[in-house]
Amino acid sequence: MLHQVRKFTLVLATALVMLVPALAASAAVQVGQAAPDFTVAGSDGKTYTLSQLRGQRVILEWTNHDCPYVRKHYGSGNMQALQKEAAELGYVWLTVISSAPGKQGHVSAEKANKLTAKRDASPAAVLLDESGDVGRLYGARTTPHMYVVDEDGTLLYAGGIDDKPTANPADIDGATNYVRQAMAELAAGESVSVSVSRPYGCSVKYN
C-alpha cells in the first residue's frame, strides 16, 4: 500500500511539473489585452518588432513544415489562400517558427525562404524564433496556432485555425475558419464573435 501511495505521489508531482509551465504560458497572453511585444529576426535578414507595426492589423501563425496538421493547410492551399485574403485586407502576416535547433520543424533562414517559395506562400515575413522566447511569450502550443492583433496592438483572437481538429485535408471543406471569420467581422466593423478557441496540431518543439 505504501508503495502505491509513493508511486501515485510521484506521478502527481510529475504531472504538476508539466502542468505549471503550460498554465504559465497560457496566462502569458490574454485576448482583449495588449499583445506582448517582441523583436525577432526574419528569414529575410531583417529584424521585426511587433510594436513597430502599430497602425496595422497583424496575424501570427505558428508553423512546423513537418507537422501533418500544417501540411493539411499548406498542401491544400488553404493557408496560402488565407494569407492572400489577409494581405488584401491590409494585414501583416507573420509566420513564426519556434522549433529549437535539432528539433522537428527547425529550419535555417535559407530553407525557410525555399519553403515559402515552394509552397507559394505569401507571409509578410517568416520569423525564426529558435530560442522559443516568442512562442512561450504567447503561449503558443501547437502548429498551427493563430493570433489576430488589431491596429492598436490589442489581441483579438487566439486559437485554432478552424473548428475541425484533424490532419485530413478533406475536413477543410465545411469547417469554420476562425481567422477568416474574425477578419470578415472586423471588416464589417463588428467585434470578433469567437475570440478564443482550442488550438490543434503538433506540439511546438521547444527546447
Image (cartoon, grey):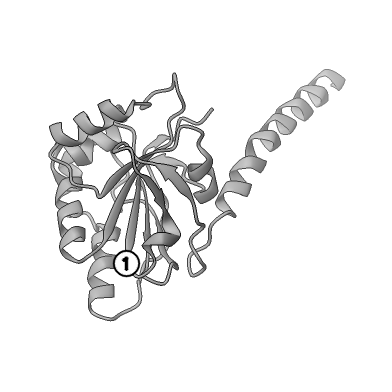
Across and down, in percent, residue 130 comes to 46, 32
Query: What's under tag 1, amino acid-wise?
Result: Gln
Q: Residue at x 15, y 54 (%)?
A: 84
Q: Is residue 160 left or right of residue 71?
A: right
Figure check: 21 above or below 153: above
Across and down, in percent, residue 38 comes to 49, 51
Residue 162 makes an appearance in the image: no
User: What quarter of the picture does the C terminus occupy?
Assistant: top right
Figure check: 66 above or below 153: above
Across and down, in percent, residue 152 comes to 41, 72
Q: Is residue 141 left or right of residue 13?
A: left
- Answer with the quarter of the image where residue 63 lies: top left
User: What quarter of the picture does the N terminus occupy?
Assistant: top right
- Residue under label 1: 56
Q: Residue furthest front?
A: 46
Q: Residue at x 28, y 57 (%)?
A: 92
Residue 169 makes an appearance in the image: yes
The residue tagged with tag 1: helix, strand or loop? loop
Q: Residue at x 43, y 22 (%)?
A: 103
Q: Residue at x 35, y 77 (%)?
A: 191
